[in-house]
Image: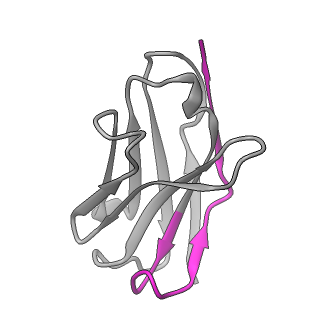
Amino acid sequence: QVQLVESGGGLVQAGGSLRLSCAASGTILSSSLMGWYRQAPGKQRELVATISSGSTNYDDSVKGRFTIFRDNAKNTMYLQMNSLKPEDTAVYYCNVRLYGSVSRPYWGQGTQVTVSS
């Protein structure tokens, strides 16, 4: 069983930075597919970034501004968010699929990020 706990959200002005953390309990392999998603009010949940075996993937809307990385020793994944925009406002969720994209997803409870203009 895997449990994920996000932290690091908050209120920031446009142009500012935040770092989100996702602490995982249970065995997470370096090859597991981990990712960050977000959901803004009235919108569907969307993929922000993923990481697996050191390879990363980003949605075009965050490329060059966000960085996803993991600390395997701490079983923690991070999302460094720079140059934040009001349209980045959303609840951010971390996600893990232990055995790749075909395996069941585990979700955290979410953390609110609000970017003021």
- The residue located at (35%, 60%) in the rendering is 74
| Highlighted magenta segment, given as a residue range | 95-117
- Name the side, left or right, on which 58 lies relative to 89: left
Q: Is 64 or 36 nearer to us in this picture?
A: 64
Q: Is residue 81 visible?
A: yes
Position of the N terminus by quadrant: bottom right
Q: Picture coordinates of residue 112 (x, y %)?
A: 66, 38
Query: Which color scheme is applied?
Result: one colour
Q: Quadrant of residue 105?
A: bottom right
Q: Can residue 70 be seen in this view?
A: no
- Name the side, left or right, on which 104 lies relative to 63: right
- The residue located at (68%, 54%) in the rendering is 44
Residue 50 drawn in magenta: no
Q: Is 109 drawn above or below residue 107 in the view shown? A: above
Q: Is 70 or 92 nearer to us in this picture?
A: 92
Q: Is 40 drawn above or below residue 14 in the view shown? A: below
The residue furthest right is 42
Q: Is 14 drawn above or below residue 97 in the view shown? A: above
Q: Is 43 or 31 nearer to us in this picture?
A: 43
- Name the side, left or right, on which 73 lies relative to 103: left
Q: Quadrant of residue 77?
A: bottom left
- The residue located at (64%, 44%) in the rendering is 111
Q: Picture coordinates of residue 101 (x, y %)?
A: 43, 81
- Name the side, left or right, on which 114 lies relative to 26: right
Q: Picture coordinates of residue 113 (x, y %)?
A: 61, 34
Position of the C terminus by quadrant: top right
